[in-house]
Amino acid sequence: MEDKKDNINNTNEDVEILDFNDSNASLDNNQDNVVQNEIVDEISPDKNNNVEVHPTDNNTKETVIKKETVKKIVTEQKVEDNKDNKNNNNNSSNNDKEVKEKNSIDKTTTNNTPNNNVVVKEVVVKKKSIASIIVMIIVFLLLILAIFALPYVTEFLDKDKAINNQTSNNTEQTNQENNTIENNGEFKSGIDVEKALTDVKDIKSYSFENVTDVYVKDKNSETLSIKNDNIYSFNETKYKIEMNKLVADFSYDTVDYYEKLDNTYNSYLQDITTKEYTKSEINVDGFNTIYNLFPNTIDYLIEDNEVENEKQINVNGENHINITLNTSIDILKNLSFETNRIQNKIDISKLSIDGVNVDLYFDQDKNLYKIEFSIEDKNIYQEDIDGDIESAVSKYTFEDFNEIKDISIPSI
């Protein structure tokens, strides 16, 4: 009986070791209460905490042992569960720490990894790209403004250059004019006009150009233009005439030749359409009608001239002299002629002017190199035309003195 009590006491001690109110217990409280109540019903401690067994039947001890075994199993399970919970809590805590550390490491890594640098570089590249686009747009606008402003800048620079050149030329001219100015303040070249004309009168090599521009109103009251441009080139024994005529939209040009061979005079006339030449023999008057235009004009000008004005001019960087002579309209008689190819007969009685201004041009060595004058009168053009002449200008120029060396006659 004492052994039984000891066993019961030991069992009771094992039971008392359990803490069913442990907050970390894994079993359900209801299950604990059920087991506890069952044991209490079978075992009731006395005042000395000794367990009394009710010997109601023979199975009591077995029942107690079985219940004790169950309770021990339950207790052991609770302890294991408590350990597992603690381990789980520890593992959970460790996992939380690992997650936190990992997150911390990830953040640190993210801040220091090359990928983050790539993002930063991409932002910088985008900013640079936008800046480049803005700069390109500004440059493009400046180029457009420069293109539009270029004509104005060029015009301004040209004007400024012209002003500077004019100022420089005026300064040069003033300095050079000081050497030839008389007491009355007018420029005097000191050139003997009659002598200068006489020196060129007998030359045989020169060119003569006569250009006449005419504006005519036809029967339909429409204005059309007529232009005759004839260039004569002379040497000792030959001359040629380059003729170009323009009437409205129609034009043609030909080149004729004339030659003197001892006492024989020939003409080479070009067909307007075929451009083929026809050779004919002409008399001396037919040859001299054009050949003597220049000497006859110079003779008249020597006999009838009055110095109208003298001035110094700049030609290709050189200081030249221009002397204007006034002469009678009769000088045109020496330039009036008519052939089967050229109609240039002038009736001076039909002109409204009574005088002609002739310009003589001298180089820096005071040698005469050009004679030029113009007639502005609607009746200077006297060919037969349909319509009324509204205006006409005829210009005469003699130059290239002693420069026409040879004239080639076409072969037939």
Image (tube, helix red, strand yellow):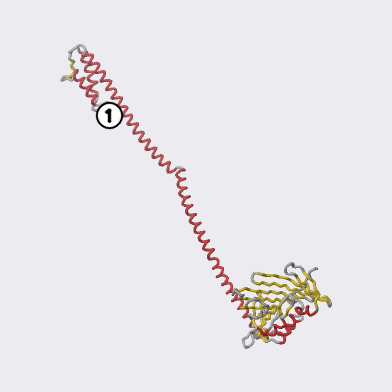
Above or below 328: residue 229: above
Quadrant location of the C terminus in the rendered image: bottom right
Answer yes or no: is residue 316 visible.
Answer: no
Closer to us: 96 or 169: 169
Closer to us: 37 or 1: 37
Instruction: Determine crowd level at label 1: few under 14, some 14-19, many 20+ residues with C-alpha closer than 10 A.
Output: some
Drawn side of residue 189 relative to residue 10, left or right: right
Quadrant location of the N terminus in the rendered image: top left
Closer to us: 26 or 376: 376
Residue indicated by mark 1: 24
Secondary structure type for disc 1: loop
- Image location of residue 82, percent across then percent down: 29, 27
Drawn side of residue 135 relative to residue 402, left or right: left
| Amino acid at circle 1 | Asn
Answer yes or no: is residue 77 visible.
Answer: yes
* Residue at left offset 32%, top offset 27%: 84
